[in-house]
Amino acid sequence: MRTGLWLGIPLVIAGALFLIWDLGEPTRFTKALSRPRTSWISRGSWILILLLAVSVALFGLWIWPFTMLETLPNLIMALEGLIVIFAFGTMVYTGLLLGASKPIPFWSMPTLPILFTVSATAAGLKTSSLVLMVSSLMQGTPIPEILGILSRLVVVFIAIEIGVLVLHLWGTRQTETGEFSSNRLLSGELALQFWAGYVALGLAIPAIADVAVSSVPIGFEAMLVLIAATLGLIGGLLLRLIVVYAGAKAPVPAFGGLYIIPENM
Amino acid sequence: MQGDCGIRVHVRDGVAVNIEGNPDSPTNQGRVCPKGISSLIGLYNPYRVKAPLKRTNPEKGPDIDPKWVEITWEEALETIATKLKKIRSEDPRKLVIWEGWGNVESLLMSVKEVETATNYTEPGVIFAMAFGTPNVIGSHGPLCSIHYASNLVHGQHPEYISDLQHCNYLIAPGRTVGLNVANPGSTRRLLDALDRGMKLIVIDPRCSVEASKAYRWVPIRPGTELAFALAMIHTMLYELKKYDDWFVKNRTNGPYLIGPDGYYARDKSTRKPIVWDKVEDHAKNFDDMSIRDYALEGTYTIDGVSAQPAFQLIKERMREYSPEWAEKITSIPAETIRVVTREFVEHAMIGSTIKIDGFDFPLRPAQFAGSGRGAVSHKGGMFFDLAGKIINMLVGAVEVPGGITGNRNPFPNPEILRPNEDGIVTPIMESIGVPFKFPPDHVDASEFYPNKHTGPHLTVKALLNPEQYHLPYQVEAFMICGANPFRSVCEKETFIEAFRKIPFIFTISPVFDETTMMSDVVLPEPFFLEREMARFYLVTHQTLADDARGLTLVLGRKPVKQLYNTRLCDDILIDLAERTGMLHGPRGINDIVNKTFGLKDKHQLDPDEKYSIREIMDKRIRVIFGDEYGFEYLLEHGEIHKYDTPGKRGYNYYYWPGNKTRHPIYFDHLKSTGDTLKKNLERNQIDIPAWKNSNEYFAYFQAIPYWIPNAEFETPPEYDLWAVNWKTRLMQFGTGDTQENAWLHELAVNDPYEMKIHINRETALKKGIKDEDLIWVESRYGKVNGRAKLTELIHPEVVGIPACYGSGTPLMNPVAKEGTHFNKLLTMKEDVALDPISGSIDVGPKVKVYKA
Amino acid sequence: MVIDLKKCIGCDSCTVSCRAENFTPAGVFWNRVFKFEVGKYPHAKLVSLPLICMHCKNAPCVDACPTGATHKRDDGIVVVDYDKCMGCKYCIAVCPYGERYFNSQLGQYYPEKPLTAYEQFSKQLNGSKHHMIGVVEKCTFCADRVDKGQEPACVKSCVSNARTFGDLDDPNSQISQLIAMKHAVQLSPELGTDPSVYYIPP
């Protein structure tokens, strides 16, 4: 739990800073909290803030003079429970955020939040195995048992991810504009990133590597886990980029032509 | 070009912040085209001329820095006046005045403001008339010489005007009816007509916006519109056998008997043209009241000489021009030609009448709207326009409701269709022709091209080869005002060379265009929003409905404060005239202004006083609209207008009904112009300059149009495509400094069809060309490059280069040079590319296209 | 608003009149005219489709805006309060019509020269005409003009009189009758945005 928090929270903070930095008016980021009733950005902001708040609270427990509160297991359990909830929220909301964009059929599929959540979970698992591997390598301790379990879990999640992806693509192809979008990654300008980047490097190779982990001689193990986790993480990033770019320019059918939405961002 | 639209400029804290249409203006009715609105940012173009300048670098070229030095107005005017005085005392012809559409408001420079309809010996520009030079060169024109046929056939100028109020079937070859260039008045009238159910047939190599709204788009090979028109006549006469018998007999010279020499057979004693009364079976004078019925066909013997009705000759000439024949030339299926001709004749409702204010007019709601620049600006193009007139006359759709009607100012006007002694509408302006003189007076070879429109191309050729053109004097100075032939004509290098030969050039200009860069002294003019001017409206180049018929209009507005040290063109000219000694006395500026604008009695200018242009405009407004109005009133209200000739008096037919006047359907006048010129040349033992074979030249001066393929039909096969050009709503003529305008440029860059080279998708793919590829278009005379736009909207054998982009100088906004300059593909070599009648340059060269 | 594509000639008078009215910086078009071809030679034609903010009844941008900068006025006009916008661009992502612009910089008309007096003037203006870096902007239906009882600038300047502006909620208004009579349609109605801009098909 501690390792997770030590690693996760700074990453979440860094991510949030990136989000703020990306704003046109970064100083106004607090305004983002004002419309949680309708806006997924607002909701996401709340989720992130709460996640961070709870995490900070939990951190606080490890710092004197609050360490004595550590003796209250219920409190810790409660906080940890909240962290799990908000962390899950963090994983889910990106998908929901894009999914709320109804005009873009490639995003507005129920499969997208699932896809992102599965991918994020897989990414979390990969990060964990990466950290465990690196720390064990650095400390010279033997590779922990749990890595094997993680690898198998990753394979499972990759399998789910592929399943959801296929479902998502099939779903998006039911509309003209969605098909236009999915064609962009299946055969269009994003095909290279999709097939070579995401599918091959981000899914296939990590899956093979993770399957192979159990059957390779010791020593290769570490390398395979490293490769699988790193590529897998890059794949996760690529997936998000590809989905964003594929969806952003869906054309509108208009009077016998297709009106291509220009890039105004 | 015209500045027809009333606008309001909103000024806050001295800054012009918005432009809106003036809802009171009957032309645009509150609407404004993109050029008009964008003039707001044109006003703030930081590249403008800001003070009087003189050059210090003797080397001249549009791209060479003249090393300008700012001078005072006093120095500038004195320098120029000293030169002008000397030239005027020696030989006024040595001053050549270049005018253009850059300043159409100017009263002293603008040709169109002056009624030269029947007096074609005057140059028509007040300043030139006072100076005494015949050399006024319209820098516009050689790519758009569309006037002769309308001048000749029904006394209209610059061309006829379409009555869109009654027309139900309009064939538009190689032109726009106003919509493609977003002219608010014409757009409104055309859309109203389409809404009402009028069928528009666009004959054009490309499918424009207008063609996209048309009943039919009929793609055609460029330069073959004449073949299409001839085939329509053939179809009417030989297949449908349907035409307006009454109109041809009573309102054309169709029944006039033509002798073996090609001219009218005449009555021996009265010298009147004769016709054949087929009821009484003998010849009679054309105006004999006892004629029972005119013979249109047959051969008759008069005094032992055989003669045939003009109609018979025309019919015979058209025998060979079947739709199948035309299909090979035009690429239009013979069946389409038949269908269009049949629909046209049906819609003309031959024999129908309409009562307007109790007066019975023939109603002919079908028009062949010839005179399109794309169709006429070819070697042989004037034959197309003449053939188009024949088509209209065959259904009787000339000067009657629904047809091609009057346009000349003031319009309508009983003078317009006044018959001459032969009973034929009196020819005007270009169709009168410049009288022959040897050695010639004109620097632009007017004596050799008597019916031509403007002659900038011929001018520079004559200046570079004075002996070949028999020019008896040396030109000493150019005065330039609102003109830029470097851009509006072709062969830029020839122009540079000719301009370099001129010892002194001065220009009145708001911008550093090519002519300014070639000048010795520059007098800066305000941008048009800064001009305190009245714009006197002309009906020209418009379509017609009741909102424009009989309209007299003047537009004006309070000017924006001048940003720089600039002065109004006309005030500069008045100062120059005073210093040159041509303001006062008989034939002085004041005297000519009085005559030209009808300033009489208390509004008359005292020949010995000096007036500002503001005072002159005030008097002119009072003369036209009455003393309760004036310049101050105009500035306050933005416009003054009245309708002089409503109802029945809005049609020229009303003044000359029945057989009171006749349009020439047989163009003996054209033949006689050619025959006279030939005789004059023989008498002086000279030839048409620069024509290898003068027989080829005179082949165009014939009384009946016929098919002559232009020079591009002889091009080697590797030139497998044709190139065409058209004006767009962002860039028509480059006047109003549209080429430097930041907003228009941004629109052009973002438009998929502007600044591109249009090529048919299939043709492009065969050549391995994709969208946005950089391609070269090469004619036998020049080449240009640009980005390819693959499109279904163009004939497979044609590439299209829109507007007049890609021409500028280093001192202009750099965006002016962007895009492709179509004119570089053209030549002005006379016997290759010129139409001998109109002087037009052929604008449809054969080209080859390849990837860069 | 109803735009009659039978009448529209794609001249961009609306585009520049919008610019003149709203002082939009170079590169930003609150009004654009999209052009495309229909059919194959020789049965092809050009269609011009003017595009502005559709001021949707169910505007996804209003829902998506996390700060409340994008909001709907009582009369249904969707506007952006530049002072509240934090530039997250989510509204651009959710707008089906691509009618929102993010100012990563303020473009200049004559980029190699100082700002024109016209551009300088806009800096002293308030509201939507005072353009800023870092925020999202779009067509306001010329809310200032509408408040004064005038038509939007694009409607007034339109050369072909293709645009009609009025109250869609009033079934007797000229615009409501025009929609019914000429069978005007919305763009992408299946998205449920219920745009306030209707098109009479070409």
Image (cartoon, coloured by chain):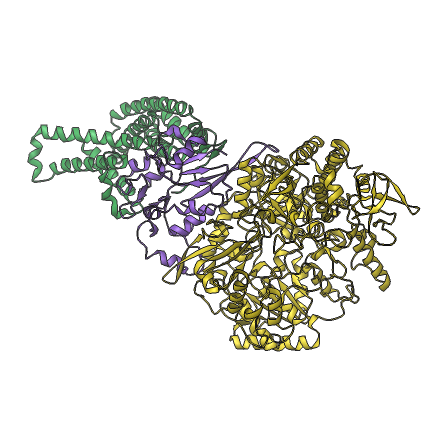
Chain colours: A green, B yellow, C purple
Depicted B453 relative to depicted B479: above or below: above
Which x, y percent locates residue B466?
A: 75, 66
Q: Position of residue B241 (x, y in %)?
A: 75, 33
Q: Taking B127 as reference, is B707 above or below it? A: above
Q: Nearer the viewer, residue B747 or A157?
A: B747
Q: B304 and B574: which one is in front?
A: B304
Residue B793 or residue B444, whichever sits in front: B444
Query: Please, which residue is most extreme toward the front here?
Result: B290
The residue closer to the viewer here, B91 or B412, is B412
Q: Residue at x 44, y 35 (%)?
A: C199
Q: Quadrant of residue A224?
A: top left
Q: Where is A51 relative to B4, above or below?
A: above
- Numbered disc total: 0
Compared with B310, B537 (above or below) is below
Residue B409 visible in the snapshot: yes
Tell me the residue at 74%/41% (across/down): B248
| Residue sitting at the far right | B304
- Does residue A246 appear in the picture of this structure? no
Quarter the N terminus of chain B occupies: bottom right
User: Where is residue A9 shown, x and y percent of the image?
Assistant: 22, 37
Residue C3, quarter of the rendered image: top left
The spot of residue B536 in percent (x, y) is 55, 59
The structure residue drawn at horizontal position 44% and vertical position 62%, both measured from the top left corner, is: B560
Residue B29 lies left or right of residue B389; in this view the side is: left
